[in-house]
Image (tube, grey):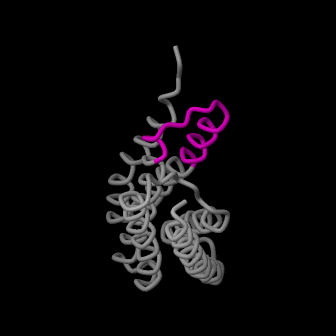
Amino acid sequence: MSLSWLPNAISLLRIALVVPILSLILDERFAWALALFFVAGFSDGIDGYLAKRFGWYTRLGGLLDPVADKLLVAGTFITLAYTQHIPVWLAAAVILRDVIIVGGATAYNFIVRPVQGEPTKISKLNTALQLLFLLFVMSRAGFGWPDEISITVLGASVLITVVISGVDYVLSWSERARSGA
């Protein structure tokens, strides 16, 4: 029996973890929120590894994986901003970038051709920094660690990579659309 369905099931699990994680943050139960967030983040690496290692790529998986990532990250940023653990402007920058990317991908999909998920290196770095930032913020809220300067530096790194990766996506996909590729 083939296990090619496993990466998609893991992505669905990650989507299912979003609501409990956000609820735990709202209830200020950061140890549990952190544990589930870690599981969700770790599962992202596992489903990607399985898809690459065994060639278990599917169109559904190409859509589910980024949707799971966006829901987890955006939901956590919004919730932590709502609870005043992070600045609203940083959450807004992260969400705006994602809205622009998803909107552009949707337009490209209907106007030019179907989108193939192709995260860039800067986008992968941005995602990693966002996840690390969220882990640090929840850890600080729950356990008082790490110090504020570490979170500030990491938050600045997130903002810089949000801007660079957002501009990179807009420019590269605009060029693809103009050339009809």
The answer to which image quadrant residue 91 occupies is bottom left
Q: Nearer the viewer, residue 91 or 8?
A: 8
Q: Nearer the viewer, residue 64 or 168?
A: 168
| x 49%, y 46%: residue | 62
Does residue 33 appear in the picture of this structure? yes
Give the x, y percent position of residue 113: 44, 55
| x 60%, y 66%: residue | 123
| Magenta-tinted stretch | 42-62
Q: Is residue 49 magenta?
A: yes
Query: The C terminus lies in which quarter of the figure?
Result: bottom right
The image shows residue 110, relative to residue 138, as above or below, that is above
Q: Nearer the viewer, residue 104 or 145?
A: 104
Q: Is 47 displayed left or right of 52 in the figure?
A: left
| x 46%, y 41%: residue | 59
Magenta region, mostly helix, strand or loop? helix
Give the x, y percent position of residue 24: 36, 58
The image shows residue 128, relative to residue 155, as above or below, that is above
Give the x, y percent position of residue 174: 51, 73
Does residue 32 appear in the picture of this structure? no
Q: Is residue 91 magenta?
A: no
Labels in figure, total: 0
